[in-house]
Structures are given as structure tokens and as C-alpha cells.
Amino acid sequence: MRAKDAVGRYGEKVAARHLEQRGWQVLDRNWRGTGGELDLVALDGDVLVAVEVKTRRGVGFGHPAEAVTPVKLRRLRRLTGEWLEERARAAGIGFREVRVDVVAVTLPRAGAARVEHLVGVL
């Protein structure tokens, strides 16, 4: 596995732990749809949340959340709809609301990862 991929996978684990510590239920990890992937799909009470995780070793190339462009947000919206069609509607599950969040993980040279959770980016 490339170092960049390992950093991303680690960031996804940190993000999932962050959500679970807040009482969320992670329903899916790395779900693949047509032309893309949802990093995490979780329940925040009765709200379905597609979570995009961006991880960087530092901010020298910008904040991790800056990598979530309008094009990426459109793709996340489409993929969330696909997830709903495949998983939720087939099982007869409904949600009060559906949203997209971003969890930005920064890995400093020493110490714990820094996690920033941006709610309702779309």
C-alpha cells in the first residue's frame, strides 16, 4: 500500500472513532457506487450522514477540507442517492434528514491526530 493510501485509511479510522465516540452509528465504510466511493455512512440519531474524510500530514498544502471541491460535493450527493437506493430503500429504512459532512484529519509529527468536523457542507 502506498504511504498516501495508508495515511488516508488511518484518517478514516480516526474519523470513524470520532463519530462513534459521539454516539453515532457507522453503517458503511468505503462504500463503492457508480464512479466513486463514500468514505463513511453513519447515523446521527435519525439523520443519515455521508461523511467525506480528508487526511493530511500537515497544512503546508492547505487544510484537508479544502480538498472537498464543488465537483466532489456533487459526486458525494449523487453517491449518497445511490446508497439510499441500494441500502436504505431496499430495506425499507427512512431518515428524517440526509446530509453530507466533512471530517478533516491532520496528523502532526508528534501527538494525537487533530480532527475537525464540518457539519452539513451540502
Image: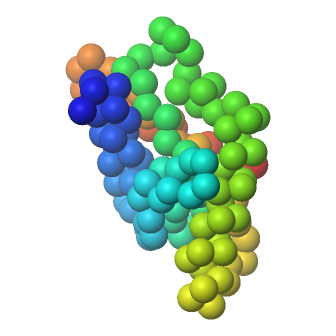
Depth order, front residue of 109/64: 64
- Quadrant where the N terminus sits is top left
Location of residue 10 with respect to 13 vertically, above or below = above
Q: Is 18 situated above or below 10? A: below
- Tell me if 10 is positioned left or right of 24 in this view: left
Q: Residue at x 53, y 27 (%)?
A: 64
User: What residue sits 48% from the left and 9% below the top?
Assistant: 60
Residue in the foreground of this view, choosing between 116 and 87: 87
Farthest residue toward the front?
34
Q: In the drawing, does residue 21 fall left or right of residue 60?
A: left
Residue 107 in the image: x percent, y percent? 34, 26
Can you give x and y, in whole percent of width and height, for residue 16 in the image? 39, 54
Q: Is residue 30 left or right of residue 41?
A: left
Is residue 111 something that shows in the picture?
A: yes
In the rendered view, tell whether residue 92 sits above or below residue 56: below
Q: Residue furthest top?
A: 60
Q: Residue at x 41, y 17 (%)?
A: 58
Callout count: 0
Residue 10 x/y as whole percent: 30, 39
- Where on the picture, by quarter, is residue 66? top right
Horizontal and vertical percent position of residue 75: 69, 46
- Is 65 left or right of 105, judged from the image as shown? right
